[in-house]
Amino acid sequence: MTKQELTALNMAGFIKSQTLILLDKLNQLNLDDCADECEELHDMAEALYLVVAQTRSDNSDLKKKITGFS
């Protein structure tokens, strides 16, 4: 995984974790509408993280097959 790929994965993970923290704060403040939107945002961030991680994993596996390295 290149440095840029790792940075993208880390950023996606950061966004995922921050939306979860924000969701907790919004729930504490009883801001239900905002919390609902934030929950959707968190779900999207989680999906993005998984897609980025899977894409990086697939590309890494492909490079290994092409070059013959494991």
Image: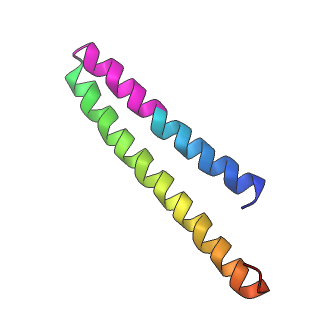
Q: Residue at x 52, y 65 (%)?
A: 54
Q: Is residue 59 left or right of residue 69?
A: left
The quadrant of the image that shows the N terminus is bottom right
Residue 34 in the image: state x and y as whole percent. Answer: 28, 26
Task: Using the image, determine if residue 2 lies above or below residue 39.
Answer: below
Where 10 sits versus 24, above or below? below
Residue drawn at (20%, 24%), measured in percent from left and top?
Answer: 32
Q: Which one is in front, 4 or 37? A: 4
Residue at coordinates 66% horizontally, 80% vertically from top-left?
Answer: 62
User: In terms of secondary structure, what is the magenta stretch mainly?
Assistant: helix
Q: Is residue 57 left or right of residue 32?
A: right
Residue at the location (34% across, 27% down)? 23
Horizontal and vertical percent position of residue 10: 62, 44
Colour logic: rainbow
In the image: residue 70, left or right of residue 47: right
Q: Residue 66 at what x, y percent from top left?
A: 74, 87
Residue 21 on image: x %, y %: 41, 26
**To which quarter of the image does residue 24 belong?**
top left
Q: Is residue 6 above or below residue 42?
A: below
Query: Which residue lies most toward the front here?
Result: 70
Along the viewing direction, whichever of 37 and 53 lies nearer the viewer: 53
Q: Is residue 46 inside the magenta stretch?
A: no
Q: Quadrant of residue 45?
A: top left
Q: Above or below — where is 7 with respect to 38?
A: below
Please report the bounds of the magenta region as a residue range: 18-30
**Quadrant (top left, top right, bottom left, bottom right) of the C terminus:** bottom right
